[in-house]
Image: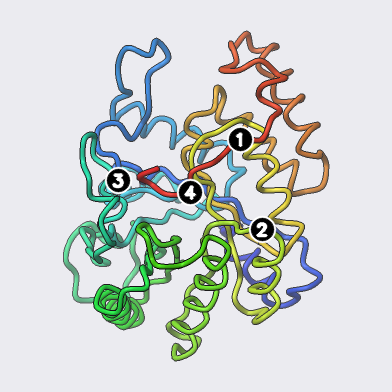
């Protein structure tokens, strides 16, 4: 089956200014960050959901078919894509987190996210594609040929040199092994000696500089980064129309936080949104995803979508986490795993 991601990427690259396509990804790779707590609390609040429950949520989202990418850990890709072939007859593209730098090591009681980011890779491209080491990357695969690679620049020469050296190794391996990737660039996770107002420019320049020496065959499919507001997003999106810009969702927050974020980012040049905790922590993830899709299609405003979402919860007799008035407010939203 044709994947919606491939069709949308082709449309956007063919007509960057005119294409109306928008890519939505669901991130269910949090077990590589939070460990046991990744699936979130069960409905009764007395326990964490199990891995089996987490994976059943993934199956439900894939069956719904409204997202374009389902991002998982390599072990979940092995179970759902390789063993169950969940994606074989779906327009949803499976993807795996291809690296797990230290700033996403968010174990309970851990302090790693507060230390300067260090590059690290648990998963291998071979295991993501085939479930085992494999020498022939031309033959058909049943896993995933798409991964998320993450970098965090801290304005520290030694640390950033290490980060870029590992990125270079990954790019070269990915090209040899017929593996596509999208690039996540976090804001500095420690004090980088920058005024807050200078962080967007620093991140934009690091992205452009890092990719200027990379030819098309080694470039990411698209970017995933913090939404720094209209000016910074428009600056990056306008610089190179072949570099598709996407935004990350950050912490859960209110429903309006998510709906306003995706609407505003789309308005100012983003063509991709990847939401993890915002979807996973929603009272009804499938209806939440439906509202995201209706917003980017222009059918609903963020305000209308919040009301429609609460209306759907009422019909389904699902108790909302917040009253409508409270859920319609913007709140401070952490964009880091450790936040």
In this picture, is 139 found above or below 25? below
At a point 47% along the width and 38% down the height, the residue shown is: 277
At a point 62% along the width and 56% down the height, the residue shown is: 23
| Tag 1 and tag 3, C-beta contact below 8 Å | no
User: Residue 25: which numbered mark, if any?
Assistant: none
Residue pointed to by mark 2? 229
Residue pointed to by mark 1? 331
Residue pointed to by mark 4? 335
Residue pointed to by mark 3? 33
The Cα–Cα distance between marks 4 and 2, rounded to whole angstroms, is 13 Å
Of callouts 1 and 3, the N-terminal one: 3
Of callouts 3 and 4, the N-terminal one: 3
At mark 1, the secondary structure is loop
The Cα–Cα distance between marks 1 and 4, rounded to whole angstroms, is 12 Å
The Cα–Cα distance between marks 1 and 3, rounded to whole angstroms, is 24 Å
| Tag 2 and tag 1, C-beta contact below 8 Å | no
Residue 82's x, y, as percent?
Answer: 31, 50
């Amino acid at each position: 089956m044709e994947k919606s991601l491939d069709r949308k990427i082709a449309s956007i690259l063919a007509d960057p200014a005119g294409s109306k396509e928008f890519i939505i990804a669901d991130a269910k790779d949090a077990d590589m960050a939070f460990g046991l707590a990744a699936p979130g609390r069960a409905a009764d609040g007395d326990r964490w959901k199990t891995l089996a429950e987490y994976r059943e949520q993934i199956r439900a989202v894939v069956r719904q078919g409204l997202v374009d990418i389902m991002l998982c850990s390599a072990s979940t890709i092995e179970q759902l894509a390789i063993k169950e072939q969940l994606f074989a007859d779906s327009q949803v593209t499976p993807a795996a987190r291809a690296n797990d730098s230290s700033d996403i090591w968010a174990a309970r009681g851990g302090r790693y996210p507060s230390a300067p980011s260090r590059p690290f890779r648990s998963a291998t491209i071979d295991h993501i594609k085939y479930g085992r080491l494999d020498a022939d990357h031309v033959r058909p695969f049943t896993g995933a040929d798409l991964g998320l690679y993450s970098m965090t620049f801290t304005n520290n020469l030694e640390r950033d040199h290490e980060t870029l050296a590992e990125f270079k190794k990954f790019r070269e391996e990915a090209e040899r092994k017929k593996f596509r990737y999208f690039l996540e660039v976090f804001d500095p996770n420690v004090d980088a000696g920058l005024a807050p107002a200078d962080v967007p420019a620093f991140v934009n320049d690091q992205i452009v500089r890092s990719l200027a020496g990379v030819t098309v065959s080694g470039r990411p499919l698209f970017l995933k980064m913090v939404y720094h507001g209209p000016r910074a997003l428009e600056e990056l999106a306008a610089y190179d129309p072949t570099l598709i810009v996407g935004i990350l969702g950050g912490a859960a927050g209110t429903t309006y936080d998510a709906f306003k974020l995706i609407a505003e980012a789309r308005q100012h040049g983003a063509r991709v949104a990847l939401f993890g905790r915002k979807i996973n922590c929603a009272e009804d993830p499938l209806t939440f995803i439906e509202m995201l899709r209706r917003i980017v299609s222009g059918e609903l405003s963020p305000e209308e979508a919040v009301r429609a979402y609460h209306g759907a919860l009422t019909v389904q007799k699902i108790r909302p986490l917040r009253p409508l008035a409270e859920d319609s407010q913007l709140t401070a939203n952490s964009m880091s795993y450790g936040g």
